[in-house]
Image (cartoon, rainbow, N blue to C red):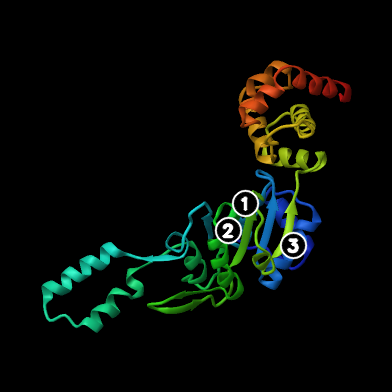
Amino acid sequence: MKTVRKLQSIDDVQAALVAQEYVCERSLATAIFLALKLQRPLFLEGEAGVGKTEIAKVLSALLDRPLIRLQCYEGLDVNTAVYEWNYTQQMLQIRLLEAAGHVNVEQARHELFSPEFLLKRPLLRAIDYPDGKPPVLLIDELDRADEEFEAFLLEVLSDFQVTIPELGTIKAAIPPVVIITSNRTREIHDALKRRCLYHWIDYPDFDKEYSIVLAKVPEAPERLAHQVVTFVQELRREELYKLPGVAETLDWIKALVALDQEALTEQVVHDTLGTLLKYRDDIQHMQGAATRQIMQRLSALA
């Protein structure tokens, strides 16, 4: 049987996260502790790839609760996010009732719009969970969804309930653990933020990123790990369209380890830039003098 860690203090939360190979500062551990203690959603903002989504996954493992993920996108609606009726099964049931004859209209309507024909989508599954153990609900990249959907979330986050006209209001006995993330491609409305605790996750400093690399890619040579983190830290000072996040740092060092590299060279950097940078203009900017200058700074630091 899996042992669930007791998270009775901020120190417990921080230690539990480290045990799950998630390195974080005390301020983030405090925000997570308060979200669990106060049963409030935790709203996380920051650049892509800094570890916002990973927090929900880690909490799911720590609390031994299922993770329900709602990936947001433009055009997301209630049918996709909350519920819809199983029209195919309803039509089949209508055919069966017609074949049986003597259809009672009221009884048929009651049967057709019963929980048996309800398809639960992520938000409803997070509220109407079956086993008494509230899940971890991840509402990922909310800034990609329309403002209309954001407004719909207000009822869910205020009272943890969903109203279905045919069935009534379904309310969570115990609120799920809610993590909302945003890459800040647009501003999220204040009305939603007020219902949440808030934390901004920034790019990590050298020591934190180095610790993350050692934890996530322990097979990497220490010299290579040190050089990679130093290079990425220097790279984030460049004028790029999209700066690399921690996720890209980890992708890069895994690629270098797969290539049996023990240390960075200018040629290796050029050959593997596509694992670190995702835009052609950024890669072109870093080919040549820009990479050479960073490599020179690395040599000076060695």
26 vs 120: above or below = above
Q: Tell me, for residue 53, which label it has, or none.
A: 1
| Residue 191 place in picture, x, y as percent | 66, 68
Q: CA distance from mark 2 to mark 3?
A: 16 Å
Q: CA distance from mark 2 to mark 1?
A: 8 Å
| Residue 94 place in picture, x, y as percent | 20, 71
| Residue 219 place in picture, x, y as percent | 68, 33
- Asked whether 276 or 188 is in front, the reply is 188
The reply to whether callout 2 and callout 1 are in contact (CB within 8 Å) is yes
Residue holding disc 2: 138
78 vs 100: above or below = above
Q: Secondary structure at mark 2?
A: strand
Instruction: Determine which quarter of the picture holds residue 263.
Output: top right
How many C-alpha atoms fall within 10 Å of the one at disc 1: few (<14), some, or many (≥20)?
many
The reply to whether callout 2 and callout 3 are in contact (CB within 8 Å) is no
- Asked whether 111 or 30 is in front, the reply is 111
Residue holding disc 3: 31
Instruction: Determine which quarter of the picture holds residue 207.
Output: top right
Q: Which circle's residue, 2 or 3, is located before the other in the chain?
A: 3
The kind of residue on which mark 3 rests is Ala
* Quadrant containing the C terminus in the rendered view: top right
Identify which residue is drawn at 50% across, 65% down. Answer: 123
The kind of residue on which mark 2 rests is Leu
* Quadrant containing the N terminus in the rendered view: bottom right
Q: Which circle's residue, 2 or 1, is located before the other in the chain?
A: 1
